[in-house]
Image (tube, rainbow, N blue to C red):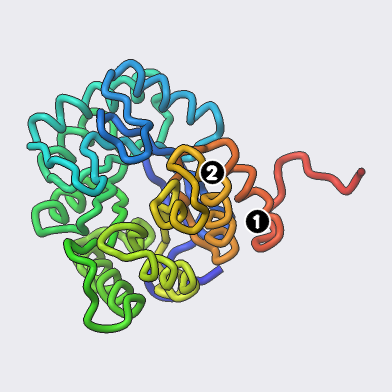
Amino acid sequence: MDTSPGRAPQTVIGGRRLVWGARTYVMGIVNATPDSFSGDGRSDPSAAIDYALAQLAAGADLIDIGAESTRPGHHPIDAAQELRRLLPVVEGVHARAPQALISIDTFKPSVFRAAFAAGGAMLNSIWGLDDELLESAAARGVAVVIMHNKRVAVYERDVVDEVLAYLERQAARAVAAGIPAERVILDPGIGFGKLPEHNLALLGSLGRLVALGFPTLLGTSRKSTIGKLTGRSVEQREFGTAGSVALAAAAKIDIVRVHDVAPMIDVVSVADAIVRGWRPAGWSETL
């Protein structure tokens, strides 16, 4: 695997050892919201907890819990409302599955700090890391997912060049703040501040993202570009998502963030066996 500066072969997050480059990890999405774009929002905490546990039982390596929708046209909520939705779910999952690696999907420092105290183990921010969020994450020694985003999908130069330059700058800031490079995970932000052709250009350049030398994450699950390509409604985009997940695994992306955990584990298992030489436990050459 790549051992260039900025990339280490493994890390421990929330008590779980992740070996970068060994295989593609699957992150299950838990939307504790009433207005998720994909129609899978669960505003009742008990339902969200049960759903998270089901994803873990299906084999998810990580669970990403968020409580504020980022769908186009969404209504922003304040930290107090986000915490009312988020904390019961994080606390419930942590109590019932204490070994679960829980990622907190927020860009608000106060929300992250409270969710970390409730059992969160890493931060997933769709708006990169501002100074306060970076300081909060560094002080707690957590892994961070830094995603590229833009309020208006206008790029003055090549979209891939601009996105990668942003991620590289953000990663350097995180490392300088004391977050180990193996805990700085980069996400190009498919569908965030990007038109369909921007998304396709980034998906065609995943090798360049991996070449930055940091762990990587990709979230394409049920996105509108997949719907545009396939003509499928949001709840029918599993196979389109599978195509992008297979390409991600082939490019050696480290984590894929998905709604449909069980089938995407099948996808990455086949891709990883071919590309990375991964084999399941008990593998033998018998027919």
Q: Which mark is residue 238?
A: 2
Circle 1 sits in a helix, a strand or a loop, which is it? Answer: helix
Q: Nearer the viewer, mark 2 or mark 1?
A: 2
Quadrant containing the C terminus in the rendered view: top right
Residue denoted by label 1: 271
Circle 2 sits in a helix, a strand or a loop, which is it? Answer: helix
- For residue 186, say whether it is visible: no
- For residue 263, say whether it is visible: yes
Q: Please count the marks in the image.
A: 2
Q: What amino acid is at disc 2? A: Glu
Quadrant containing the N terminus in the rendered view: bottom right
- Horizontal side of residue 46 vs 218, given as left or right: left
The answer to whether 78 is drawn above or below residue 1 in the figure is above
Q: What amino acid is at disc 1? A: Ala
- Horizontal side of residue 227 vs 177, given as left or right: right
Residue in view at x 62 percent, y 48 percent: 267
Residue in view at x 38 percent, y 64 percent: 196
Residue in view at x 18 percent, y 65 percent: 152
